[in-house]
Amino acid sequence: MTLGIDVGGTKILAARIEKGKIWEKWKFKTKNDEVIKIIEEIIERSAERVVGIGVPCYLRNGVCINAPNISEFNGKDLRHYFKRTIIMNDCTAMAYGEYVLRNEKYNSLLLVSLGTGVGAGLVFKGVPYIGKGSAMELGHIKGFSNRQCACGKTGCFETVVGGRYVEVEERAKRAMEGDKEAIEFMKEYGRAIARGLSYAIQLLDPEIVVFGGGISNAYELFIEPVKEELYGLLSFIDVDDIIFEKAKSEDSGAFGAALIAERRLL
Ligand SMILES: [Zn+2]
């Protein structure tokens, strides 16, 4: 059995995995200044020998360079706290989980997570791609606004589509109830997603793009505007050749973290 842990800004999800399936799972609230303690306890209690942890951090060799949502992680070498574990970016874990949930059939899967912040993960030929450790930080491509970003720089893509900067979930709810202004907002929101996403698609030419994170619950409200805007933004790549889907599970972060650890992919 393998343990997978997905650390989010509001909740921590732990799942026990065997034979490619989740057998048991637990949810914990993310409490500031107690995140490390909570995770240590989960690991201790579970006695699993293989543990994978997905964290919302820019990582370099297990050291958390920056974690806008979990300040307790900032600057810490997480391997020192979570011994004998495989530590990875949460979107990398989510991307791999979604890849396996699709029977590992895609050659290139790009996951975009829309939540408090914006992240991305890539699975290419069955392996997660992380560069030197900080690849796929789609949320921090610059030139989108004049706003200060949680990463310390200005104008990141995240500042125009991240839940921390724009109120999306409330408007998505109103749009689903038929509120015209909210429906318009969601269309513009979709076009804004496309403007950042186009960079990733133009570079990677993925077979499938999967949207995860809390805001992806509004997938039906933004996906058509995303595609329409992409038609104008992409060169050489046909938007109709790309498969767009919503994440299959909210547990794919914990699931993917466990599988990456079990298969020793990082
Ligand atoms: Zn940023």
Image (tube, grey):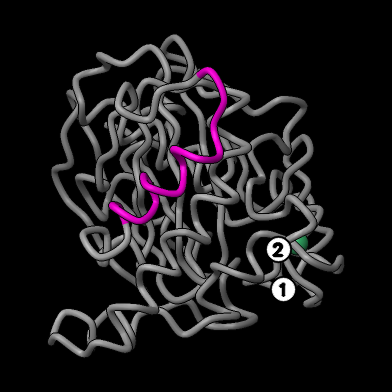
Q: Which residues are magenta?
A: 223-236
Say whether residue 262 is left or right of residue 67: left
Q: Position of residue 234 (x, y in %)?
A: 54, 32
Q: Up-down: is 14 above or below 164? A: above
Most distant residue in the front direction = 232
Could you tell me residue 109's position as x and y percent?
Answer: 40, 26
Residue 230 within the segment the image draws in magenta: yes
Where is 106 relative to 135, above or below? above
For label 1, the SS is: helix
Q: Quickly name the residue at label 1.
A: 71
Q: Main secondary structure of the magenta part?
A: helix
Q: Quadrant of ligand 1?
A: bottom right
At label 1, the amino acid type is Ser
Rendering quarter of residue 34: bottom right
Give the residue displayed 53% in from the left and 81% down from the top: 166
Locate the N terminus by quadrant: top left
Question: Horizontally, is 170 left or right of 166 in the view?
Answer: left
Residue 156 percent coordinates (x, y): 74, 61
Q: Which picture quadrant has residue 14? A: bottom left
Going 59% across and 27% down the picture, which residue do you hit?
202
For disc 2, the marked residue is: 67
Q: What is the count of numbered marks?
A: 2
Q: Position of residue 241 (x, y in %)?
A: 32, 21
Near mark 2 (Cα within 10 A), the count class, few <14, some 14-19 or many ≥20, is some
